[in-house]
Amino acid sequence: MGGPKRDRDIPKAKLNFESLKQLRFVFKYIKPYKWYFYGGLMIISLSAVNTMMFPLLMGKMIGAVSGKDVSITQMPQGVSVKDLSFLKEAWPINITLLLIFVQLSFQVLLSYFRVYFLSRAGASATGDLKKELYTKLISLPMSFYSTQRVGELSSRIGTDTGQINDTLTFVFAEFLRGLMTLVFGLTAIFMISTQLAGIMLSVVPVIAIIAVVFGGRIRKMSRKESDLLADSSTVVQETLQGISVVKSFTGEELENARYGSNISNWVKYAIKTGMNRGLFVAFIIFGIFGAIGFVVWFGANLIQSGGMGIDDLVTFVIFSAFVGGTLGGFADMFGQIQKTIGATERVRELLEMDGEAYGKKMDEENKRFNGEIEFNEVEFSYPSRKEIKVLKGVSFKAEKGSQVAIVGGSGGGKSTIASLIMRFYDAEAGVISIDGKPVQSYGLNQLRKQIAYVPQDVTLFGGTIYENIIYGKPEATEEEVRQAAKKANALQFIDSFPDKFQTIVGERGIQLSGGQKQRIAIARAVIKDPAILVLDEATSALDSESELLVQEALDDLMKNRTSIVIAHRLSTIRNADRIIVLDKGMIKESGNHNELMHLENGIYKGLSQMQVML
């Protein structure tokens, strides 16, 4: 009863040649900013070289204190002591300290410009990707959204692109830096002492592999722990949202038991996870410090035997720390790259989908429709429920400027007709025509600009009243907005607010009442001045006073334009030119109010009498 699990983690893709090819898709967005990206890579190279100077300078510092030069006992083939004679010379301690701060200052500059260049390239590229993905999302047809969860789509544009940005600006840079540090560090430790290098490389990889395996297990357990905790949070959310139901059914004891069970499961697993995490930390401490202790012990024996100096040992240990830290960081970087490949695959999947064709016919773009609508033997099933026919051979005609009402039981196909007129979906069979031409012959922009849709559940955006009204006509003047509000019976309540048209409506219009939201939606339709008006039970959820005001606004809006009215309250459509009665996807009755009321045992007559009785 805890509800469905959320998609908390980006899936990790397997690392292979084919999956790595996915990253080429990301780099096409880097292309416009390639010089920043290349500059960042060049600075990474300089930074890696500069970082490797620190162990050498620290060795020189110890050499100055101990009175011994920093010696290099092992030379690569082809490199003579003479070539590196400056490394054997003793440096004054003050000069060495100064060089350390020069090196660190240079590192600060390199780090700043590395982050700046890569952040600029990565953020700019990710911004372009986000905009393209958003454009694709809002262009996808309604059939796509009927099978998707909004939360998952938001995750694509937020979490997935964020993962890609992290990789471009940080992970990729650190991976390249780590590779270079590894190469320089291993070269240095072999130059200092082949024996110590062999010991370190026989111990550190073993610790690293065990740490990776153990760490992966801990991460899986942590995710399971998060899932259990989320389940308990879901119980709290469901209970508090439905607190009136809980209290009315005296379900407090049941909910306490449900929440207590979830928390008990979480506590048990949290303790188990804590024990494993403790073992992991203990192993890491023992392994790393044990390895360091063993290397220092072996190096101390070499010092005693004259095989190396104490300065060599210090330099070696610092280089080893760099190598060990780099090896330890690779596991997480590989995991991040796997996540990036997974995120890239999910983003590409959306970008490669076919969006709606918004093409316009330029010669007809500004031509106003007459508004004649005709359905001819139309059949339709929703993509997610192909086996269920929602409309079966529906045929009717709405003349220019007429008002056609559609009534019937729930699930009969009323709202589907509205969706087909707007071309949210296309009919499977039959033809839907406007002004004698199939709707598919019009560009979607051209078609939808001629139609205004006022639903029962009004969606307002979280800005101001003014912004919500002007959404119907972005180029409208302030006077047009005011006149639209007046025609929608909304001006009086808008002017009563301190901020008037600049009043913030809140998320989904939460700051307004149902009637106020509905009148704002009507004002949005008024300012659009459509040839066709589609009203989907626009007054069914309102109280009597609000319904009267909204109905007056709708009556004014429907003048001189073709109106398709999906009605629940039959009193609002008595003056309709034609009333169509749908039952199980088929037209059972058709006519005006008087004609339908004279049908013996008619569906409309029965519905009307039932509402009068209520």
Image (spheres, rainbow, N blue to C red):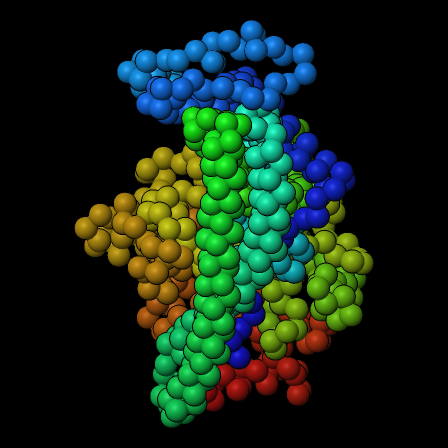
- At 39% from the left and 91% from the top, the residue drawn is 253
Displayed quadrant of residue 76: top right
Residue 349 vs residue 197, the one in the foreground? 197
**Vertically, is 423 above or below 88?**
below
**Vertically, is 609 above or below 205?**
below
- At 33% from the left and 47% from the top, the residue drawn is 464
Answer yes or no: is residue 423 visible: yes
Residue with the most extreme top position? 82
Q: Count the labels in the image.
A: 0
Residue 386 vs residue 293, the one in the foreground? 293
Displayed quadrant of residue 26: top right
- At 65% from the left and 60% from the top, the residue drawn is 147
Q: Give the percent coordinates (x, y) of residue 408.
A: 61, 75
Residue 247 vs residue 413, the one in the foreground? 247
Q: Give the percent coordinates (x, y) of residue 382.
A: 71, 63
Residue with the most extreme front position? 305
Image quadrant for the C terminus?
bottom left
**Vertically, is 188 above or below 430?**
above
Q: Give the percent coordinates (x, y) of residue 342.
A: 64, 47
Q: Give the percent coordinates (x, y) of residue 585.
A: 71, 71
Left or right of residue 288, residue 58 in this image: left
Answer yes or no: is residue 552 visible: no
- At 44% from the left and 76% from the top, the residue drawn is 267
